[in-house]
Image: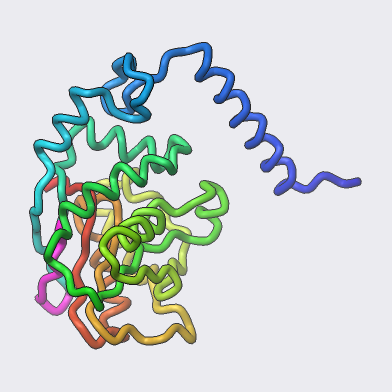
Amino acid sequence: MAITMRHLRSVLRQIDLTGRSVFSVLVPQLCVACDAVLADSSRQWLCGRCEKEFAESAGARSRVVELEDGQGLRVRYALDYTARVSKVVAEMKYGDKPGLAALLASYLGVALGAFYAKDALLVPVPMHAAKKRERGYNQSELLSSLLSSVLGPDSRSDLIVKTRNTTAQAALEKEAREENVTGSFAVRRGAARADGDVILVDDVVTTGSTLRACAEAIRGDCRGEVSACVVASSV
């Protein structure tokens, strides 16, 4: 029987996961934010010091990303994008740790708090299909789904799509990020129109280029206000 590339990747992934399970028994677990040994076996991700630091610094903050027509996109966030926050986000996205989404979603809830209407729609920033297959999940979809289960608004990952498999924004300088994502998002053909407010959900905002491109794509198909909510902001 011929072995397909997809099958091979699946087998390798299972071997990798099994190896990690064995490795975790032999080697102490480390805090994903600072690499300190987790002496408390009940802790999964953060040491006590980092957990306290994150909890004490989390709050309902906001900034405005300017759109093409001069209007502003309100972006709410909970944490400043410090080195430790950056490491946790990177581990979720690139370290094959989707379970971290539950931790980060708790901070998203702090950021959004009372600043949403119950009939608002949560819309995760989409990932190109090829990149999602490679990673295995879209972290923004995980965050949006978890936020929905806690706060109540519906989460719809079928409303907008990524039409081009662009270079990762983190790999680009500030000036190149806008050009990289402009026109790379669109409302999915045949998707039901959003009747109320829309809240875009993502992990981090830096220049705002990605959220701006998503907002520009969806505004014409949304009868309410478009805003955004992210875990952390670099500004």
Q: Quadrant of residue 191?
A: bottom left
Residue 76, position in %: x, y?
15, 59
- In the picture as drawn, the residue positioned furthest to the front comes out as 42
Residue 7, position in %: x, y?
74, 46
Asked if the magenta segment contains residue 72, the reply would be: yes
Residue 193, position in %: x, y?
36, 86
Q: Residue at x 40, y 43 (%)?
A: 93
Q: Is residue 120 left or right of residue 144?
A: left
Q: Residue at x 53, y 61 (%)?
A: 129
Q: Is residue 91 left or right of residue 104?
A: right
Q: Is residue 14 left or right of residue 219?
A: right
Q: Quadrant of residue 234?
A: top left
Q: Is residue 171 above or below residue 54?
A: below
Q: Nearer the viewer, residue 159 or 181?
A: 159
Q: Nearer the viewer, residue 43 or 91?
A: 43
Q: Is residue 90 above or below residue 180?
A: above
> What count of labels does the image hold?
0
Q: Residue at x 70, y 48 (%)?
A: 6
Q: Is residue 202 above or below residue 163?
A: above
Q: Is residue 202 left or right of residue 74?
A: right
Asked if the magenta segment contains residue 215, the reply would be: no
- In the picture as drawn, the residue positioned furthest to the right comes out as 1
Q: Residue at x 67, y 41 (%)?
A: 9
Q: Nearer the viewer, residue 173 or 49?
A: 49
Residue 54, position in %: x, y?
17, 35
Give the magenta part as a residue range. Answer: 68-76
